[in-house]
Image (cartoon, rainbow, N blue to C red):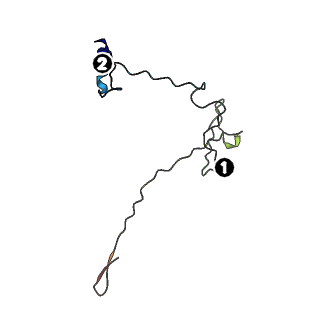
């Protein structure tokens, strides 16, 4: 009798044709993957993945502060002592170009109508 209970108790969806819903125990434990000793993400010393700056950009916009934050005097580009460069790449939206074709009908002096 105990041999029969042991054999029946060992049956599950993994070793028989029983459906998984008939399993009464929890999921089998997964073996943990061996750790490599490195942290997740970009590793120290790895190169950057950004795009290089364009040598000749299509448009250049200068952003000059209007007034001094200390005293409030107005500032212009002549007072500039340097700048930081940043470049933004914009992909233009694809738009649909609609072309209307008109086939005109013309009447000749002889009375015939001809379509273009």
Which residue is depicted at the point 38% across and 22% down? 27
Q: Mark 1 — residue? A: 55
Task: Name the quadrant of the C terminus.
Answer: bottom left
Q: Is residue 81 left or right of residue 106?
A: right
Q: Which residue is mark 2?
A: 8
Q: Disc 1 on helix, strand or loop?
A: loop
Q: Earlier in the sequence, mark 1 or mark 2?
A: 2
Question: Which of the 4 image quadrants contains residue 7?
Answer: top left
Query: Of residues 71 and 101, which is closer to you in this image?
Result: 101
Looking at the rendered structure, the secondary structure element under dot 2 is helix
Q: Is residue 62 above or below residue 20?
A: below
Can you say whether 1 is above or below 111 in the image?
Answer: above
Answer left or right for 33 relative to 87: left
Quadrant of residue 14 in the image? top left
For image coordinates 43% across by 21% down, the residue present is 29
Specify few, some or many for label 2: CA neighbours under 10 Å numbering under 14, 14-19, or 20 or more.
Answer: few
Work out whether 2 lies above or below 49: above
Residue 64 position in % (x across, y down): 63, 40
Tell me which residue sits at (50%, 23%) in the image: 32
Residue placed furthest toward the top: 2
Q: Name, please, the residue furthest toward the right.
A: 81
Image x and y of residue 84, in percent: 66, 39
**x, y percentage for residue 20?**
31, 26
Give neighbour class at mark 1: few <14, some 14-19, many 20+ (Cα, 10 Å). Answer: few
Q: Residue at x 48, y 23 (%)?
A: 31
The image position of residue 69, as x and y in percent, is 63, 31
């Amino acid at each position: 009798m105990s041999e029969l209970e042991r054999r029946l108790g060992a049956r599950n969806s993994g070793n028989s044709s029983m459906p998984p819903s008939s399993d009464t125990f929890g999921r089998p434990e997964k073996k943990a993957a061996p750790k490599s000793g490195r942290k997740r993400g970009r590793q120290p010393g790895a190169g950057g993945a950004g795009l290089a700056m364009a040598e000749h950009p299509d448009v250049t916009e200068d952003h000059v502060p209007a007034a001094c934050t200390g005293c409030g005097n107005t500032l212009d580009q002549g007072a500039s002592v340097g700048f930081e460069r940043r470049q933004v790449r914009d992909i233009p939206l694809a738009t649909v170009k609609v072309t209307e074709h008109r086939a005109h009908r013309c009447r000749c002096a002889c009375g015939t109508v001809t379509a273009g």
